[in-house]
Image (tube, helix red, strand yellow):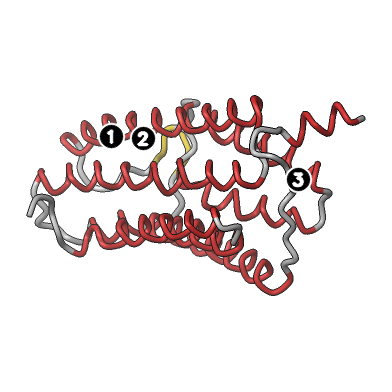
Amino acid sequence: MIGFYNYTVVLTYVSLISSVFGMTQAIHGHFKTAIFCLALSGLCDMFDGKIARTKKDRTEDEKAFGIQIDSLCDMVCFGAFPALICYLLGVRGILGLLIISIYCVCSVVRLAFFNVLEGKRQQTEGGANHYYHGLPITSMSVVLPLIFMTQFFLPDFVFLVLLHIVLLVVGILFVVDFRFRKPNNRTLAVLVSVVAAALAALVIYSTFRVPRQSQDSSPIIDKIFEE
């Protein structure tokens, strides 16, 4: 069999499986489950690199494979999956599809740049990198669940406007070149706790309503013209 099979890539595959399952749930309108799957994928991604580095005898091919498989899975989990959720929630029409396209292109550019940068860095430095260049794509697994929570106290139109803005801004930040320090274990624990609390509230208090519109319409533009 081609590929490398050891414990260093298990969390990466769990993250991918979670997102694929989440996509099927989003398509059927089960958005709470889909958001939970996105957050779970993000949680797995937070720790897969740390687990991979515990294996000290990895070959150069294994390291290169880890970089590639991580980015390929990230594109599905934090590129295509959030874009699908946002589309199904109402980011549609010409404006919505333009924003989704920008988000996906920025995701691909960021991950390709990371592969090039990380491959070169490991050849000279090795170990873990302490900084991101631009906003990490995994951040969408924290941002989108928190934005999703605002639907419970914001009007539908305001929620959809916020969803458009966040998707566009986060996508652009993927490719803006600024140094962003990687969170330590303590910070990761705080992030996990915040998302876990949001998801708990989501499950307990949720009465989520999906705005109804045709597939080709843009709720934002429709609302503007109505007024």
Residue 160 is drawn in which quadrant? top right
105 left or right of 12? right
13 left or right of 46? left
Which residue, given by chain and number where applicable, does mark 1 sit on?
Answer: 115
Instruction: Tell me the residue at 47%/33% (across/down).
Output: 104
Please count the marks in the image: 3
Could you say whether the residue bearing mark 3 is in a helix, strand or loop?
helix
Which mark lies nearer to you, 1 or 3? 3
- Residue sitting farthest toward the bottom: 204
Instruction: Tell me the residue at 74%/48% (across/down).
Output: 211
**Contact? badges 1 and 2 (CB < 8 Å):** yes
Label 1 crowd bin: few (<14), some (14–19), many (20+), radius 10 Å: some
For the C terminus, give its image quadrant: top right
First in sequence, mark 3 or 2: give its number. Answer: 2
Could you say whether the residue bearing mark 1 is in a helix, strand or loop?
helix
Q: Amino acid at mark 2?
A: Leu
Please name whichever residue, 129 or 10, is drawn nearer the observer in this view of the structure: 10
Which residue, given by chain and number where applicable, does mark 2 sit on?
Answer: 111
Label 2 crowd bin: few (<14), some (14–19), many (20+), radius 10 Å: many
Vertical comparison of 168 with 48: above or below: above
Which residue, given by chain and number where applicable, does mark 3 sit on?
Answer: 159
Q: Amino acid at mark 3?
A: Phe
Question: Marks 1/2: CA distance?
Answer: 6 Å
